[in-house]
Image (cartoon, rainbow, N blue to C red):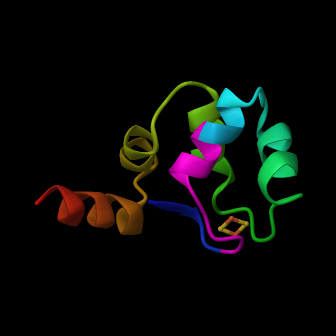
Amino acid sequence: MYVCLCHGFTDGDVRKAIADGCRSVAAVYRHIADRPQCGKCVPDVRSMVNGQGVAEAASEQGNCCMTMALTEAAA
Ligand code: FES
């Protein structure tokens, strides 16, 4: 699932960055895309860095678009 539309990276890309040793949001962006553009994906990346999945983060943040995509994907 896409996490960042500006740079086109996915939750798998973030997981790989974390597996490669990135332990902060800034490190993940440096690893994948240099830095955020609009910043809308930062909370999701932060949640993943903190050990939380994107689905949980989307639901906690009330991210309706992401929650809808996850709901549709699960159906
Ligand atoms: Fe990631 Fe805009 S959605 S920087």
| Count of residue discs | 0
Tell me if 75 is positioned left or right of 5 in this view.
Answer: left
Instruction: Tell me the quadrant of the picture where the N terminus can be found.
Output: bottom left
**Residue 11 or 64: which is nearer the viewer?**
11
Q: Nearer the viewer, residue 49 or 13?
A: 13
- Residue 67 horizontal/vertical position (percent): 32, 58
Residue 61: x percent and y percent? 46, 48
Q: Quadrant of ligand 1?
A: bottom right
Q: Residue at x 40, y 54 (%)?
A: 62
State which quarter of the image contains the C terminus.
bottom left
The residue at 45%/36% (across/down) is: 53
Q: Residue at x 63, y 58 (%)?
A: 41
Query: In the drawing, does residue 29 fall left or right of residue 4?
Result: right
Tell whether position 13 is magenta: yes
| Among the 4 quarters of the image, the one containing residue 24 | top right
Towards the viewer: 66 or 63: 66
From this view, report whether residue 67 is shown above or below residue 8. Answer: above
Find the magenta span and give its range: 6-15
Instruction: Where is residue 55? Give x, y as percent.
Output: 37, 45
* Residue appearing at x 87%, y 58% in the figure: 35
Q: From the viewer's perspective, is residue 35 above or below residue 7?
A: above
On the image, the x and y values in percent for residue 69 come to 31, 66
Is residue 12 placed above or below 64 in the rendered structure?
A: above
